[in-house]
Image (cartoon, grey):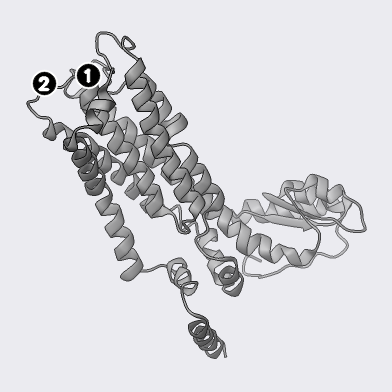
Amino acid sequence: AERCQAVICCRATPLQKSKVVKLVRNNLKVMTLAIGDGANDVSMIQVADTGVGISGQEGMQAVMASDFALPRFKHLLKLLLVHGHWCYTRLANMILYFFYKNLAYVNLLFWYQFFCGFSGTSMTESWMLILFNLLFTSAPPIIYGILDQDVSEEILLQLPELYKTGQKSETYLPSTFWITLIDAFYQSLVCFFVPYFTYWGSDIDIFSFGNPMNTAAMFTSSLHLLIESKSVTWIHLSVMTASFILYFIFALVFGATCKLCSSPANPYWIMEKHMADPLFYLVCSLATCVALLPRFLYRVLQGTLFPTPLLRAQHLRKLTPEEHREVDQTVESCQY
């Protein structure tokens, strides 16, 4: 029975429909989708991992019990091949990015503990630590998770084979997860030790030492997201630019007004001094470039030497209409 591509059940009761879905899900260890348009399909829709209800002549019971509602059955194709693919890819990449960003930023504090006797001291002011995730780097991932499209709608409908990448969880593989964690460790090492060796032997205070690290970490995490984005629009760039501007405005205002915020250390006028120092820009730029270099090279080599089917599909939208027609003719000839 596991080799059957389809099974037809005639005149089944609502309970029998739900048992069929439960049998397939539990025995084959797969995610199930149930679609129906009447009240007798409600139990089946509720048992399935994803329920789709069609609003028709048999009432709205199926729609009210479903996860997604469709006006026509033909719209199921676009729901699965396009929006299902986009949703899976966005969620998988967002999970990887949040693991990466939090690990990379927290490790900055971890590396510093080797130089402060593991006393729990932070080289960054507490408000900057709180607002890093809460305000400065929160908006770009949200825009990325909403708007990113790795492959266009037309190509996903034209090549339904691409849906298999989601079924096989190719975006969130164990190897991808561990590569992301290793990259986060590497980037945190660069963002910490580039400023560390730059200011080696100087007499700067603790917050002046941590400010370049914090700034480099913000640029690195934001530009890392830009490298991972498959479709960059003006909204992505505007939100990212606004996050950078907000970070520097807050740091300047906070440094100009907070004279006795973190006694005995003092964050007063630190950002103002750094923005007048060319060495600060050099340190932040060097740390960001060195930190992102392996990730950038990995994506370049992946796209040229061992591209995945999704990467090949992404190149189709860059073709001219004449090239598109040649590809279509080649695909049709191969099918026949």
Q: Nearer the viewer, residue 328 or 323?
A: 323
Q: Residue 243: horizontal and vertical position, in percent?
A: 43, 38
Image check: 6 left or right of 203? right
Given residues 300 and 49, the one toward you in this image is: 300
Few, some or many C-alpha atoms within 10 Å of disc 1 (few <14, some 14-19, many ≥20)? few
Residue 103: quadrant of the picture: top left
At horizontal 56% and vertical 49% (from top left) the residue drawn is: 146
Which three-letter amino acid code belongs to the residue tagged 2? Asp
Question: Mark 1 sits on what residue?
Answer: 118
At horizontal 38% and vertical 44% (from top left) the residue drawn is: 222
Residue 128 lies, in percent from the top left, at: 36, 25
Query: What is the crowding at mark 2: few (fewer than 14 residues within 10 Å), some, or many (at least 20)?
Result: few
Residue carrying label 2: 203
- For this orientation, the residue located farthest to the left is 201
Q: Secondary structure at mark 1?
A: loop
The x, y position of residue 242, in whole percent, is: 45, 40
Q: Residue at x 26, y 17 (%)?
A: 121
Residue 263 sits above or below residue 236 on the image: above
Which amino acid type corresponds to the residue marked 1 in the rendered image?
Answer: Phe
Q: In which quadrant is the N terminus drawn?
A: bottom right
As helix, strand or loop, the secondary structure at mark 2 comes to: loop
